[in-house]
Amino acid sequence: MKQWLMIGLAAAPLLVTGSPAPTIREFPLPRADVFPHDPAVAPNGTVWYTDQRNSFIGKLDPRTGKVVDYPTPTPDAGPHGIIVAPDGAVWYTGNANGTIGRLDPATGKIHEYSIPAEASDPHTPVFVDRELWFTAQRSNRIGRLDPGTGKVQLYEVPTPRALPYGAVRAPDGTIWVALLGTNKLLHVTPGTGALSEVSLPWPDARPRRIAVDRAGHVWFTDYRGGRLGRYDPSSGKFSGWPAPTPKSGPYGMAIDPDGRIWFNESAAGQVVRFDPRDSSMIAVKIPTSGAIVRNMSVDSTRRRVWLAESGVARLGMVELR
């Protein structure tokens, strides 16, 4: 893949304050020391999440507020990333003990897969063509698990200590990865396992989470540079918008059904909605102080954005207007 250094000189975003801001509804989780890390929404609206500290997979019914916990088969797995596959199965990464789990929502049973020692810290899962791909941050690798055979294939990221972090499946079936340890993105072609890096035009950039819109534009949160970034693979053009709060550590992100970008300012205790049509931003304060949103999930059917509020034992929900 060609690497271009064309920069879109985006104007400072307009912070909208006059119109009513969205609100966040919080759902307290019953376990006192619960640490929700990532959320994922099932087709029926159920919200699954990882309790990293206690090694449980949680399930929230938003209609009743009822929560069910499923302990990981191996204690202290440190579940981190989580997704719901097309068949409804719930997959998570055991970041602390080198495992990947598949939870059957019909029975609650979990099957664990062991990951080779070279990638002992699986991080963010992505499901593509009946296979589970995942990042391994400290191991500096991308992995591919065949659920049928249990075989795992590993690919080393070209840049040393690149810290592959957030990952997402693009509309064309390829995978984009944010490399937190450097100012680069990684493009993965699942069919061949080919890895191609794209350098960002900002030396201080450290992309953390990533999302791809319907047009194929790659969006990312720049955790250290304090910006929201966009890369257009078809033109090689980059654009960037500063977050409303300086040094706010933009972290979790998602794209809603209307194409608006949501991201968390982890050091400011708020979530920001960015509208690409006019570059406007609306900042929404998280009700409970101390919350850090490491990841988000979108329920397009019910028009909701879900937040895992680490540090305050809650899930958050934004009803889209």
Image (spheres, rainbow, N blue to C red):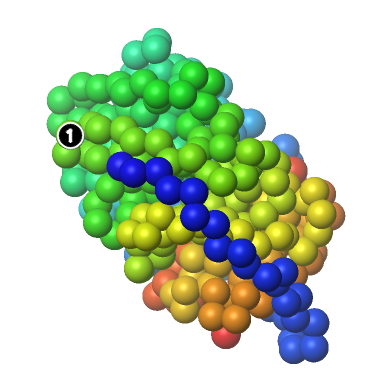
Q: Position of residue 163 (x, y in %)?
A: 53, 28
**40 or 135, nearer to the observer:** 135
* Residue found at x 53% / y 21%: 161
In the rendered image, the quadrant that contains the C terminus is bottom right
Q: Position of residue 302 (x, y in %)?
A: 45, 76
Image quadrant where one finds the N terminus: top left
Left or right: 129 in relation to 223: left
Give the tally of numbered discs: 1
What residue sits right under mark 1 in the picture?
192
Which quadrant of the figure has residue 236? bottom left
The kind of secondary structure element at disc 1 is: loop
From what the image shows, is residue 185 above or below residue 276? above
Is residue 183 visible in the rendered structure shown here?
yes
Residue 178 pos. (x, y %): 49, 41
Q: Residue drawn at (24%, 56%), measured in percent from left and top?
A: 172
In the drawing, does residue 2 fall left or right of residue 131?
right
Q: Nearer the viewer, residue 183 or 31?
A: 183
Q: 16 above or below 4?
A: below
Q: Amino acid at mark 1?
A: Thr
User: In this picture, is 310 found above or below 121?
Assistant: below
The residue that appears at 39% across and 12% down in the rendered structure is 118
Residue 297 point in image, percent of width and height: 50, 58
Q: Residues within 10 Å of mark 1 (few under 14, many from 20)?
A: few
Residue 104 is at least partly visible in this image: no
- The single residue placed furthest to the top in the displayed view is 117
Which residue corresponds to the image point at 62% horizontal and 67% vertical from the top-left?
10
